[in-house]
């Protein structure tokens, strides 16, 4: 990464994956909710070593259903990061899931800021 990047360049790099994520999540909102739920379950509950591969495969299936063509969304990025080929230690799955939820929370905040919807009573 270039150490001389400007703030504008960093924001531009972040907006492209956010837009791709927005399109993917809008196309399949139930898969988006399912992904968040399954990721939170990994963080909240212990994963038995025998359940590791099925758990990872379910997460990857959710990620791929959201971005099957790899358009550079957050889902595409984490599909590669959560892959058993990329995680060398099983305990790192929890770290990746925490990072995924942080990214999705940032995405949700970004989406809310763009909408500018207000509740009127």
Image (cartoon, helix red, strand yellow):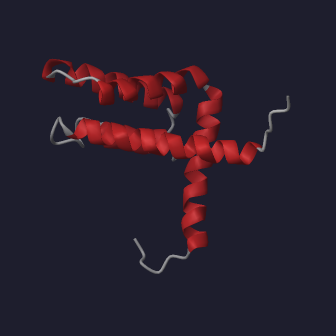
Q: Position of residue 112 (x, y in %)?
A: 68, 42
Residue shown at 60% from the left, 63% from the top: 12
Residue at image x 23%, y 35%? 84
Which image quarter holds the C terminus? top right
Instruction: In the rendered view, tell whether residue 20 sits above or below residue 25.
Output: below
Q: Is residue 63 visible?
A: yes
Q: Position of residue 7 (x, y in %)?
A: 57, 72
Q: Report which quarter residue 28 is drawn in.
A: top right
Residue 50 vertical position relative to residue 72 in the rendered view, above or below: above
Q: Which of the 4 image quadrants contains residue 53?
A: top left
One can see residue 71 in this view: no
Q: Quadrant of the N terminus?
A: bottom left
Q: Is residue 62 left or right of residue 30?
A: left
Name the residue: 34% across, 37% down: 97
Residue 15 in percent (x, y) is at: 61, 55
Which residue is outermost to the front?
121
Outermost residue on the bottom side: it is 4
Q: Going by the picture, which residue comes out furthest to the right? A: 121
Q: Residue at x 26, y 19 (%)?
A: 54
The number of numbered discs placed on residues in the rendered structure image is: 0
The image shows residue 95 at horizontal and vertical percentages of: 28, 42
Image position of 19 (left or right of 86): right
Tell me if residue 65 comes above or below residue 69 in the rendering.
above
């Amino acid at each position: 990464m270039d150490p001389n990047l400007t703030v504008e360049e960093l924001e531009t790099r972040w907006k492209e994956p956010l837009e791709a994520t927005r399109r993917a999540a809008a196309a399949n909102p139930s898969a988006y909710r399912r992904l968040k739920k399954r990721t939170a379950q990994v963080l909240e509950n212990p994963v038995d070593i025998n359940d590791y591969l099925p758990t990872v495969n379910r997460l990857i299936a959710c990620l791929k259903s959201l971005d099957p063509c790899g358009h550079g969304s957050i889902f595409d990025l984490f599909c590669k990061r959560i892959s058993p080929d990329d995680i060398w230690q099983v305990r790192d799955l929890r770290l990746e899931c925490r990072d995924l939820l942080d990214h999705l929370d940032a995405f949700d905040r970004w989406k809310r800021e763009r909408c500018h919807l207000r509740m009127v009573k």
